Image: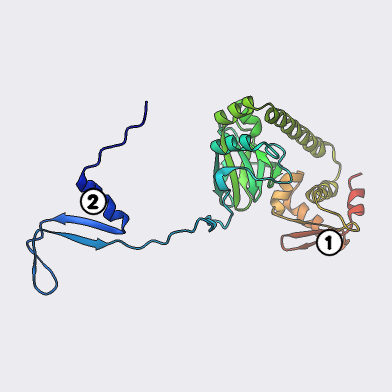
Amino acid sequence: MPAVSPVIDSSEWDHRRSALAGLSIETGRRRNQVAPGGRKVTDRMLVIPRKKRRMRSPTEKVKTPYGLEVVENHIPYPLPKDRLFRNLPQAVRAELAAISLSAAYRKGEILFAEGQAPRGIFVIYEGSVKLSANSFDGKSLILHLATPGDVVGLPGTISGKRYETTAEALEPVQASFISRRPFRDFVRAHGEVGLRVAETLSDIYHATYREVRYLGLSGSAEGKLARFLLDLTADQDHDHGHARAKLILTHEEIADVVGTSRETVTRLFAEFKRKRLVEVHGSRLLIVNKASLQKLLA
């Protein structure tokens, strides 16, 4: 059935046309009001100029509250670690755009909580997110640090089971959110995406198994910290044993990752710096002697 255009009478059309011209119209009887010069205002139309608003140029970038770049059209753009949506055909990417929403989070805000019914997945574009599990007595274990290109919330979104971790922004985060039902329908419709989902879930399983084995079987605290620092710089190019990374976790949070106390982490950092294994400048980490750190893993 064709769409029916609404009928607009002449007075309403005049009002709309004047509003578009940047004016607000107010009508009515003004017998008791006095205009400049002492003349009475009788039946007349009072025209009040509207406040001018700055129009954004189509080429001007939109600013977000946290200084992050808006993801145009909600289409995931290529990222080095993004293998779930990378190199999809343009038509498939357009379908993805239709079900994706862009979202920004402040540092410390929660994307989803452990035990919460799954709402969907989050694709991280900027910033970092920690995935942690918490015990009833208040202990916390950080299982993964999600960085640009990572997808969080995938296992629960696919299985329908509650989120097993809490996802918290470690810094301002820009992400794309896709609700559970539309995402599952999207996966069903595209076999290639389904295969990538299976590969990603396999990666999550192996990474979790590796962390459990590492925490349970690794001998010394210094070996655990050395492993954490080496993993942190694993994606960086090493030049003569040197690699740089950004330390976004506090000593207490690093302790939650490696399964030790904050005091032990602080002491080991001081020891590593004294032995010229690492250098720390604010939030910047420099691996000075990779070979010596690797020996601590034995």
Report how many numbered discs are placed on residues in the image.
2
What is the C-alpha distance between the residues marked 2 and 1? 76 Å
Q: Position of residue 292 (x, y in %)?
A: 92, 54
Is residue 199 in view? yes
Residue 193 — which label? none
Q: Earlier in the sequence, mark 2 or mark 1?
A: 2
Q: Position of residue 157 (x, y in %)?
A: 61, 30
Residue 273 — which label? 1
Q: Residue at x 73, y 55 (%)?
A: 247
Q: Identify whether 131 is placed above or below 194.
A: below
Residue beneath disc 2: 14
Amino acid of disc 1: Lys
Classify residue 177 by image quadrant: top right
Callout 1 environment at 10 Å: few (<14), some (14 to 19), or many (20+)?
some
Classify residue 218 by image quadrant: top right
Q: How is the image coloured?
A: rainbow
Nearer to us: label 2 or label 1: 2
Query: Label 1 near label 2: C-beta < 8 Å?
Result: no
Q: Position of residue 64 (x, y in %)?
A: 53, 55
Q: Position of residue 81 (x, y in %)?
A: 73, 43
* In this picture, residue 165 sits left or right of residue 43: right
Q: Identify whether 266 is placed above or below 85.
A: below
